[in-house]
Structure formats: C-alpha cells, structure tokens
Image (cartoon, rainbow, N blue to C red):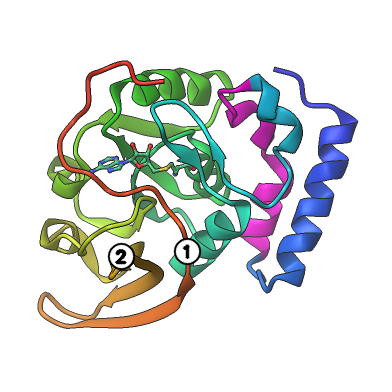
Amino acid sequence: MEDSLIHKGQRNQLVKALRDKGITDEKVLFAIGQIPRHLFFFDKALEKFAYEDKAFPIASHQTISQPYTVALESQLLNITGREKVLEIGTGSGYQAAVLSLMGASVYSIERQQELYTNTTSLLKELKYAVSTFLGDGFKGLPQYAPFDRIIITAAAPFIPRTLLDQLKIGGILVSPIENDKKQELIRIKKISDTDFEQTLHGECAFVPMLEGINFQKNI
Ligand code: SAH
C-alpha cells in the first residue's frame, strides 16, 4: 500500500488534465489530487496506468470509472458541505473515496458480493469513512433515506422512481442513462414530490446497472 512521490507527481498531472478538460470544482480537484487511485486497482499489472484518464477493468467484469467521468459526476452533484450521498455501484470504491474527501457522508451500494467484500476492507484500510452495503441499487436504501444527493455509477435503463422518492426536495441525482445504446450523463433536480428539472451533460461509457445481487465469484 505504497504511495510514492512519483504517484503524487502523476496525480498533479492528472489534475491539470482534468482542469484542461473543463473541471472547475476545487473540492473535486483537491480530492483527485489526494487519493491514491493506484491502490484501487485489483490487477497490480495495471497499476502503472492508474493516473491515465481512462477506465480500467477491476474484478467481477466491472470497471473503475475514467477520472474525468468521476470528476464530472462529482462536480454535477454540487457538494457544498456535509451532504448525505447515496452511491449506486461501489465498484473499486474510488468514486466513494472522492466524495468522502470532498466532505460528503457517503452510503454506497454494490450488487457484486466479491467487490462489496474487497472494497469494504480496502476503504477501511485506507481510512475513508464510507458506509458500504451489499444490495440492489434499484431499491436504494430506504432505511437511511432521504438523501441530499444520489449518484449512479452504472448505466441505468431508466431512473428508478424508488431512488427519486429517496431524494430530498431540492436534492440532486446524477446518473448515466442509456437510450438506443447511447449513454449520456443526466442531472435531475427535485423541485417537489412531482416536479423535476433535468439537464444532459454529454456522452459517457459505463457498465450496465443490473437488478438483483450476484453472490458468485466472478473474476
Ligand atoms: N463507482 C465505481 C464504478 C464501478 S462500475 C468506481 O469508482 O469504481 C459500476 C458498478 O456498479 C459495478 O461494480 C457494478 O457491479 C455495480 N452495479 C451495477 N448495477 C448495480 C445495482 N443495481 N446495484 C448496485 N450496484 C450495481
């Protein structure tokens, strides 16, 4: 679990690249500049690419998202203080770590048992205060609702009504949404129990959001 000066230098370069691509939220850039992304790679052979702005495979046929996408989703959430955030798709834990370092109180759900187990212990070891859950993100976490923010990090075929119900009025949900094989980032603001404002924020590439829990080991 080593974080060297070389890694720190590579992170500074990554932060610069994200600024050049239009990321302006200083909390996001600070978090990405601090977090050792290489430690979130399951495949040690890929660690040397950790500060490239690309997605990479992790276990269970899933991916660690591209840093630009993590940065953009985080920026769209507009974290200003200690917002309570629900994340769907813990995966490697990197996105959850970014939100946690930005000051949010993070609750994250994963449907792959293997990833849930590995990532829960990694986040604990790296001392990120993230609460992790094995479950189906389509159901959310009713026992902890309502949330100030919800972030989905897998491509949703539609935005589940259950999740919009678990969002506070004035709250924001950010998610990739898939239509005709094309994925776009969507940001939804809850104005009232029945009114929502939505905006689109460009194309993206995520693994699909799937229903149910997978208990199989699936490298
Ligand atoms: N936020 C992650 C991205 C991982 S990829 C990171 O920073 O690494 C998306 C993850 O969403 C995968 O791990 C996948 O298993 C998970 N996922 C897909 N559908 C889900 C669902 N219905 N509930 C919870 N997790 C889900």
Q: Quadrant of residue 213?
A: top left
Q: Is residue 91 above or below residue 149?
A: above
**Residue at which label 1 appears:** 204
- Magenta residues, dominant SS class: helix
Q: Amino acid at mark 1?
A: Cys
Ligand 1, what quadrant? top left
Quarter of the rendering containing residue 24: bottom right
Tell me the magenta residue range: 26-43
Residue 70 visible in rendering = yes
Task: Count how many numbered circles sit on residues in the image.
Answer: 2
Relative height, residue 211 to residue 167 (above, below): above
Question: In screen coordinates, is 185 left or right of 6?
Answer: left
Query: Of 80 and 208, which appears nearest the observer?
Result: 208
Mark 1: secondary structure: loop
Expressed as whole percent of the image width and height from the top left, the position of residue 180 reads 28, 70
Name the quadrant of the N terminus: top right
Q: Is residue 9 left or right of residue 87?
A: right
Q: Crowding at label 2, few (<14), some or many (≥20) Cα neighbours within 10 Å?
A: many
Magenta region includes residue 2? no
Earlier in the chain: of badge 2 and badge 1, it is 2
Q: Quadrant of the C terminus?
A: top left
Q: Residues within 10 Å of mark 1 (few under 14, many from 20)?
A: some
**Three-letter code for the amino acid on which mark 2 is drawn:** Glu
Which residue matches tag 2? Answer: 178
Q: Rounded to the nearest whole Å, what is the CA distance between mark 2 and mark 1?
A: 9 Å
Q: Position of residue 205 (x, y in %)?
A: 46, 58
Helix, strand or loop under label 2:
strand
